[in-house]
Amino acid sequence: MKVKVEPPRTKAEADPGALYQQIYALVRSIPRGRVATYGQIAALLGKPRSARQVGYALAASRRQPDLPWHRVVNALGGISRRANADDEQYQRILLESEGVGFDLQERVQLARYQWQP
DNA sequence: TGCTTGACATAAT
DNA sequence: CATTATGCCAAGC
């Protein structure tokens, strides 16, 4: 059967090897039940000051099928504000369904769940 | 081409 | 704890 292939929407998606592609590869390697922070992803790519691009990359790439975007949270273990408030709740539900617990301040206990590559 | 806006992080105030 | 400033780099106008 033929799979529908969408044309690239952004330069980054069209350019393999670009920063975004590296981000996607890394995010895909986060195991179930664990989380990583935006800054951590950036740091692992050798760009400790580019955490912003990580978030931007995820927002710009909903067309990456097997991308566990929900396993990426901010430095405090919280879910970052989005345009869509529903997505924030959805992310939390996905994490909880993987066994990731939140504390009373709505934050993931990074000490327990943060991914250690 | 230049300016503004972001799923961020960190330091300073 | 909140507010501000700065670095980062891509997207969109």
Image (cartoon, coloured by chain):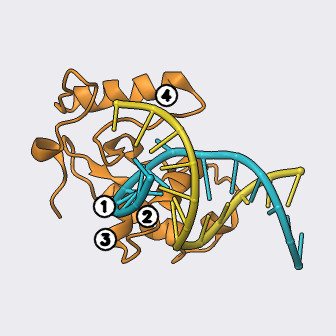
Chain colours: A orange, B cyan, C yellow
Q: Nearer the viewer, residue A58 or A17?
A: A58
Q: Nearer the viewer, mark 1 or mark 4?
A: 1
Q: Nearer the viewer, residue A63 or A101?
A: A101
Instruction: Give me the disc on residue A87.
Output: 4
Placement of B11 over or under C7, stated as above or below: above
The residue that mark 3 highlights is A44
Query: Residue at 28% of width from left, 59% of height from top?
Result: A29
Q: Nearer the viewer, mark 2 or mark 1?
A: 1
Is mark 3 in CB contact (under 8 Å) with mark 1?
yes
Q: Chain ID for label 2? A: A
Instruction: Tell me where residue C2 appears, x and y as whole percent.
Output: 45, 32
Instruction: Give me the disc on residue A113.
Output: none
Structural distance between the alpha carbons of marks 1 and 4: 22 Å
Q: Secondary structure at mark 1?
A: helix
Amino acid on which the number 1 mark rests in the picture:
Gln
Instruction: Give me the disc on residue A23.
Output: 2
Instruction: Tell me where residue A81 appears, x and y as whole percent.
Output: 49, 34
Left or right, residue A80 beside residue C10? left
Can I make out residue A62 in this image?
no
Q: Secondary structure at mark 2?
A: helix
Instruction: Tell me where residue A46 appears, x and y as whole percent.
Output: 36, 77
Residue neighbourhood size for the residue with mark 1, other residues' Cα within 10 Å, grouped as few (<14), some (14–19), many (≥20): many
Residue neighbourhood size for the residue with mark 4, other residues' Cα within 10 Å, grouped as few (<14), some (14–19), many (≥20): some
The residue that mark 1 highlights is A40
Amino acid on which the number 3 mark rests in the picture:
Leu
Residue neighbourhood size for the residue with mark 2, other residues' Cα within 10 Å, grouped as few (<14), some (14–19), many (≥20): many
Task: Determine if marks 4 and 3 fall on one subunit.
Answer: yes
Query: Residue at 37% of width from left, 73% of height from top?
Result: A45
Query: Which of the two labelled residues, at mark 2 and mark 1, occupies the earlier sequence position?
Result: 2
Structural distance between the alpha carbons of marks 4 and 3: 26 Å
Amino acid on which the number 2 mark rests in the picture:
Ile
Query: Which of the two labelled residues, at mark 3 and mark 2, occupies the earlier sequence position?
Result: 2
